[in-house]
Image (tube, rainbow, N blue to C red):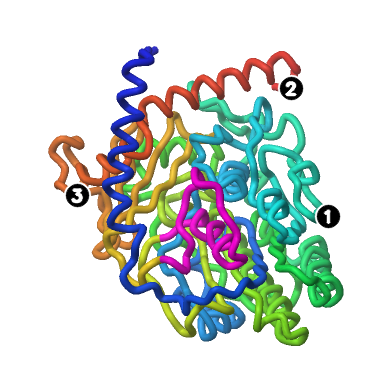
Amino acid sequence: MLRISKKELAMVMDRRKFLQGTIATGILFPNLPFCNVEQKEYNVVVLMSDEHNPKYSSVYGHPFVQTPNMERIAQNGVVFENAYCPSPLCLPSRSTVISGLYNHETQCYSNCTLFLDDFPNYGAVLDKQGVHTVYIGKADVYREIEEMGFSEVIHGWNRGTPGDTAIQRKPLYIRKGAGQNRAKGWGLNENAHLKDRLMVDTAIDWLKTKGTQLNKPFVMCVNVSAPHFPHFTEPMFWKMYQGKGDYPKYGSEQPSAQHPYALDLRMHFETDQIQGEDIKGLRQGYYGCVSFVDAMIGKILDTLEETGLSKKTLFIYTSDHGEMLGKFGMWWKCSMFEDSVRVPLLVCGPEFEKGLRIRTAVNTLDMQASFFHTTKRNRPHNWRGIALQRLQKENPNRYVFSEYHGHGTRGSSFMIRKGEWKFIWNSDAPHQLFNLGEDPEELNNIITDGLERAPAIAQELNEYLHSICDPVIETQKAEIKIQKQLEEIKKLGIA
């Protein structure tokens, strides 16, 4: 194992701070913010779904997946066309958003809940500054949501201890039976969305009663599980896509599907066992689940309008990560491919113009920063992200960062997006570079002969990555934490 001296670590940190300061000069002071800047404080309502790949919605260009309420947001607000999650897995992504810190800073690497540290969170920080913070539904973060200092928690859902135990990377853990079991997780089910409906109805009731009576701003986060697998959906949404279950355009025959991390994930989840009608059924069910989420968006938008809250409330729709949905033979998340790491991000309400589509790359840490900008409260100086209201309409020079240290791959990965370019640094596999303008489906990795011979843009993005963190050091730290968790799992006699 590589050992790093305190002096060497200090040099890395000093270099990182310098580079961050240099690069930040070009992005922190945008010339043309797209929002209508005002000083008045407003409310925020966020609906966060689980596992929504934005490509599967009409507002992001899908030919038949119906999302009229997302289109409604687009007409009355802003669509962020290139939004990313901070890490393509539930607990790491949600922990990053709630804490304002990068995934390698929280060290919430997987869905295992053993030996997790505690950090300040936006709910408590805003509450202490006189903002009423409400959390409804799934939390899945580093601490039980009821203990995190939100003003109110309703129907809080916590993962519990020890969480996921299938986290071993070396050798790679195989989830025996996962492919066969999950392959049948689709179809018509009248009760498929009962819990999600309860979350949304609870939020609506709160908005109609408490929300209209508060004499201070509020920030509410409502969480639904759809379109996360299994892909069962209610009759009306299943029938909506009858006969439209299809196969992914790009399957396991593609060169990108042969990347070691892609092969790892297919083995880890045994996804090659998902075949034939199950592929079509899972995809049809997913389409139905997406349209269900869209219907819930409509119910919240209607409530905001009926109560008059829409005039003083920012509404945001997003998700915690995406879904591969069979592309490259891969399912679910855990990958740095666009289908897994991209998320929808749509915003409407005060401070935002209507009918804009923004290509500037963003992530959900920027969304969290907007909570503070909208309520006019102070955000901790060390938290990551820039409020969406402060960004330019078009900024091809902005960098966005994501990372993954979880189950299913042999090592860590780090992503940098700038303009049309996307660079993925892999600890235990070849690095990847894609030009998303020319190759939006990531079919052709431009790095064919090592990073040292890659185009100059790869060197630039690699340099920016090292300004955020040393990927070698962070990969080692992740492996040490994972081994500690695995030892505890063994002691508990779980695995």
Where disc 1 sits, the SS reads: strand
Name the side, left or right, on which 202 lies relative to 417: right
For label 3, the residue is: 457
Give the residues in magenta.
362-390
Q: Are the two marked residues, 3 and 1, in contact with CB atoms closer than 8 angstroms?
A: no
Disc marking residue 494:
2
Quarter of the image with the C terminus in it: top right
Query: Mark 3 belongs to which amino acid?
Result: Ile
Q: Is residue 321 above or below residue 95?
A: below
Disc marking residue 327:
none
Name the side, left or right, on which 414 lies relative to 101: left
Where disc 3 sits, the SS reads: helix
Which is nearer the eye, 109 or 355? Answer: 355
Name the side, left or right, on which 264 lies relative to 93: left
Q: Earlier in the sequence, mark 2 or mark 1?
A: 1
Q: Residue at position x 56%, y 57% from top?
A: 368
On the image, the x and y values in percent for residue 172 come to: 50, 26
Q: Residue at position x 80%, y 54% from top?
A: 153
Does residue 138 appear anywhere in the picture? yes
On the image, the x and y values in percent for residue 396 come to: 28, 63
Name the side, left or right, on which 386 lies relative to 186: left
Q: Earlier in the sequence, mark 2 or mark 3?
A: 3
Q: Is residue 193 above or below residue 251?
A: below
Disc marking residue 155:
1
Query: Mark 2 belongs to which amino acid?
Result: Ile
Residue 128 on the magenta span: no
Q: Is residue 123 above or below residue 495?
A: below
